[in-house]
Amino acid sequence: MTVDESNVILKMTGITKRFPGTLALDKVQLTCERGKVHVLLGENGAGKSTLMKIISGEYQRDEGTVWFNGREVNFTNVRQAMAAGISMIHQELSLLPERTIAQNIYLGHEPEKEGFKGIVDQKKMVTDSKALMDSLGLDMDPQTSVKKLSIAQQQMVEVVKALSQEVRLVIMDEPTSSLTSREINKLFEIVERLKQNGTAIIYISHRMDEIKRIGDSITVMRDGQYIDTVSAAEADLDTLITMMVGRKIQKMYERNYREPGKVIFETDNLCGLRFRDVNIKVREGEIVSLSGLIGAGRTEFAKAVFGIDPIDAGCFKLYGRQINRIDPTNAIKYSMCLLPEDRKKEGLVLQTPIKENLTAACLKKTFKMGILRNKPENEIGEKYVRELRVATPNADKIVGELSGGNQQKVVIGKWLETGCKFLIFDEPTRGIDVGAKCEIYILLDSLVHQGYGILLITSELNEVIGISDRVYVMKDGEITGELTRDELSQDRIMRYAVGEGEVV
Amino acid sequence: MSFKKQNSASLISHILILLAVIAVMAFLRPESFWTVNNLSTVILQQAPYTILMAFGMSLAILAKGIDISMASVMVLSCYLSAPFFKEGNWLLGVLIAFGVGIGFGICNGLLISKIRIEPFIATFSVDFVALGIAYVVCNGKYIYGFSNSFRWITNGELIPGIPNVALITIVVFLLLLFLTRYTIYGRELYSVGYNAVAAQHSGIRVDRMIISVYAINGSLAALTGILFLGRLNAADPSIRGTLTMDSIASALVGGIAFGGGKGSVVNTVIGALIIMFIRNGMNILGISTNWQQSVVGLIILLSTFYNLGIENVIKKIIALRSMDQKQPVQ
């Protein structure tokens, strides 16, 4: 698409960013114009946030050039970028709850009393923030403390805060994920005002309807690469989704499907923190994926089922047993386990040896009379190091010294040793290398052949398509769709995940 | 490096401090410090109380907590049970002493695990409550004059040459060493201390573990109280003294890390002996008790730097040695 060169405020070309072991951005480009909304589109992990952090000075690029406001820039911290007129509104709220709206808005650049350096002019701060909020059409008392505000109002304060200094470019990272439609309208009014003032906006969102509504141009990214930039008016949904998910068919996934057996896990209108009315079932011998975007409530669902978080309403059946309340100890007793999302914090005791982690969930089974003995523990250690091919000289090695993939194998070994047959795997392949991923897929396949039932939560669509028998899609805490293996496609999953399921 | 080697590095480094303290004193005052009489008095008669209390403190710290209330709970259990010991109603005395100790311990555990109050704040508050009740019950009156048969519990010598209080401490030490090192309970305790979230995800009942740890602390406080009664032949709230601070100091100087999960009851014994010998040494050198407090404070500070420094050195030595051993095989 054509760009009016005289109007360009930000121009990034050939941006490359490497993290240890991964290429986060590969020669990405982006051009923003004054008074325009530029939408950045891509799956989780496509590199959008990394790119934004390079603009706002949080990360430094490895290669490429950034032009901002007519000159080449190289921000080494957030303050420099802010001083140049770049403001970022984060997805997670970063306000101080105990302080007032005005204090939050002017945090770090409080107006000083005339003649008294270092003394904050409270009065000026309040009147200035009131004026600022009025200009944006917000009716809030600047002296209210932030903790009394709703999440949506806090989001608005974040916006005001971003605009309290002279801004030329505002970055909004999924600003509407916690807003109701009325509040979204309000936000869009503000965006409209900003555009009229000549401010450029980079807008990150997964919601297709919004993108068409406020976007002027759209840049799509995938796997750290720049795909294309199109005009929002001309773009159609199908093209965008195709561009987002790509067409790569990977050979990594080996599945030998089998006829599933009896139902082992079934929820009945299960409600909890950030999910509600979930009805899903898993049968013996099948891998069922729970797909959706990050923040859709999938991890919260898994934690509630395993008994880490409370169940608010509803119940579930596990191997025929009706369960309303549960804790992890009983969950394991009833043959269920959860491979947690964060293996370092939740899955392993990093400072202890491999073998101690392997027996952690079945101490009573391993050690008779409650007395620790070396022999059974060493046997278990050797067995899983051998069978799961953990790369270590022996099972005495401290688990924290292993690589991510090998750590994950230890967590899996821990659960296999318990003999639990219903496994919930939350992001089992996150942050591990391709080789280990492949091994985990093969392992999952062999497990379902031994009669295990697996509920897989993953944000990688390729993975969902590659190894699932069935897929449930969750959006904002609700199941929006169920797809069988024949119906699986990335387009379909994405449509359900972003709330466009009806269009299909 | 393997897990066991890391732990033994920590232990060796602290035994070194203890030996250094003893060596310095033996050099400065060989005639009064380096005598069987003085050494056995410190180890067998003075140290046991601090060691017993420090055991409890160490368990709490291992479970990523702390127990500020132990000394006051000791005073209260001591005070409430003293009249019965005096009358010779020993069974009731023991029941009341341990009942009070374990009761307050469970209370601490519930506050920390179920109500999720920070361990420091929970036990700090309970400390005031327990001590306050002790002063009210005491009401300025001392209980004194216990029978010799009662005092035998502390001062008698079931094994000639070793006072019973030392014998009891050794038994408790062996029990705790067994419990923490060779049982599922011990494994779970360390897991909770290292990473309570992961422990919970592995099906370990973290709340129960925490409550049980503070209950054990309470019973250790009760036991120390009974032994103290026998030694002092009197009960009054001032016996609390510096026991809380000394037991925290023992754990820290011995190498029990505040982050939880690191160290063992062996470290506690070494730490307590270091503190006791430093106090004893300063007494012999004629340094006033006021200055002794400051010195103990400095020792704690120095020991944290020492922990960082010497452990790395010893780890390197061990690593080098194990490399030497491996090379011929290759």
Image (cartoon, coloured by chain):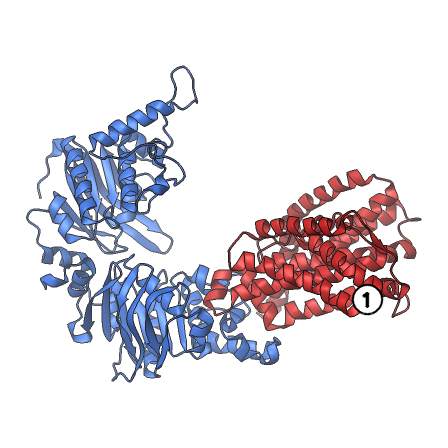
Chain colours: A blue, B red
State the image coordinates of residue A232 (x, y, percent, origin top left).
10, 47
Residue on which the image places disc 1: B167
The kind of residue on which mark 1 rests is Leu
Residue drawn at (62%, 76%) of the image: A371
Rendered-image quadrant of the C terminus of chain A: bottom left
Count all numbered tags in the image, as a single digit.
Answer: 1
Instruction: Work out which residue is located at the far top of the displayed protein and give it.
Output: A115
Residue drawn at (35%, 71%) of the image: A424
Rendered-image quadrant of the N terminus of chain A: top left
Above or below B267: residue A422:
below
State the image coordinates of residue A47 (x, y, percent, origin top left).
27, 51
Above or below B279: residue A266:
below
State the image coordinates of residue B109 (x, y, percent, origin top left).
58, 60
Q: Which chain does tag 1 point to?
A: B
State the image coordinates of residue B218 (x, y, percent, origin top left).
67, 61
Above or below A244: residue A37:
above
Is there any visible trace of residue B250 in the rendered image?
A: no
Instruction: Work out which residue is located at the far right of the displayed protein and give it.
Output: B31
Above or below B247: residue A354:
below
